[in-house]
Image (spheres, rainbow, N blue to C red):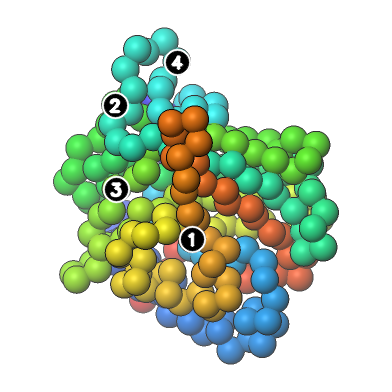
Amino acid sequence: MPIHRTYEPARLKRRDILRGAVLLTGSLLVAPALADQLWTPTQIEGPFFPESKAGESDADMTRLTGSNRKAKGKEVVIVGTVRDLGGKPLAGASVEVWQACESGRYHHRRDPNKAAVDPDFQYYCSLITDKDGGYRFRTIQPGSYPAAAGWDRPSHIHFKVRSKGYPELITQMYFEGDALNQKDSILLAIPKKQQKLVVVKFQTLESVATGRFDIILNKNDRHGLLATPILL
């Protein structure tokens, strides 16, 4: 089971971090370039980035090495490419992925969610894109969880992408058809043109729900401050 790294002081609360990020995201909407160009938008890292990367991190998050048990929840496969605004594939890019399990709980000591941790779920994986900029991993659809009073976050998966010559991108991927998408302050703070880049449609391929999440990097996107948790 991977251990996870935290950046926020113990006094930070999930709702403070999320609310602060929403306000900052909204302030970026005034930039015409952000609204006019279509690249994958920056979103918050969140308070539960892995505390350590020493644990298992392969591309199958549904099963731990040496175990016959599988993680609880709906199994999904996510494929995609990392490329630049001109469509050039970015080979050798680093793609880190982390998420909650089927119950909506992160494997993180500071997660206040009372839902159960899944001992059979990997929670984190680390990938390198191939010569065509491609990546692929298998996971489960994460559960929703309460972020604040009257606000439940929809199913989402976190991504951190690095490629030489580009600013680090931290973003989140959402599942098309999730009713909570229409109420999520973080997703709705993104310009509508870019929302469609992070909400993924799934279809059944070879008996597994498969979605395509293509990630587009912009050399001039300098809004990486959204990756830092904010305390209001």
Marks 4 and 3 sit apart, C-alpha to C-alpha, by 23 Å
Which residue carries the number 2 mark?
119
Which residue carries the number 1 mark?
199
Q: Check the picture and name the quadrant holding the N terminus.
A: top left
Q: Earlier in the sequence, mark 1 or mark 2?
A: 2
Q: Secondary structure at mark 4?
A: loop
Is 156 situated above or below 103? below
Q: Amino acid at mark 2?
A: Pro
Mark 1 in CB contact with mark 3 (< 8 angstroms): no
Q: Amino acid at mark 1?
A: Val
Q: Nearer the viewer, mark 2 or mark 3?
A: 3
Q: Nearer the viewer, mark 4 or mark 3?
A: 3
Q: Earlier in the sequence, mark 1 or mark 3?
A: 3
Q: Position of residue 138 (x, y in %)?
A: 49, 33
Which residue carries the number 3 mark?
143
Give the camera-side residue of 89 and 211. Answer: 211
Marks 1 and 4 sit apart, C-alpha to C-alpha, by 31 Å
How many residues crowd mark 4 within 10 Å: few (<14), some (14–19), many (20+)?
Answer: few
Q: Secondary structure at mark 1?
A: strand
* Residue 94 in sight: yes
Instruction: Say which mark, if any, is on residue 65.
Output: 4
Q: Amino acid at mark 4?
A: Thr
Q: Secondary structure at mark 3?
A: loop
Which residue: 39% across, 49% down? 48
Marks 1 and 3 sit apart, C-alpha to C-alpha, by 16 Å
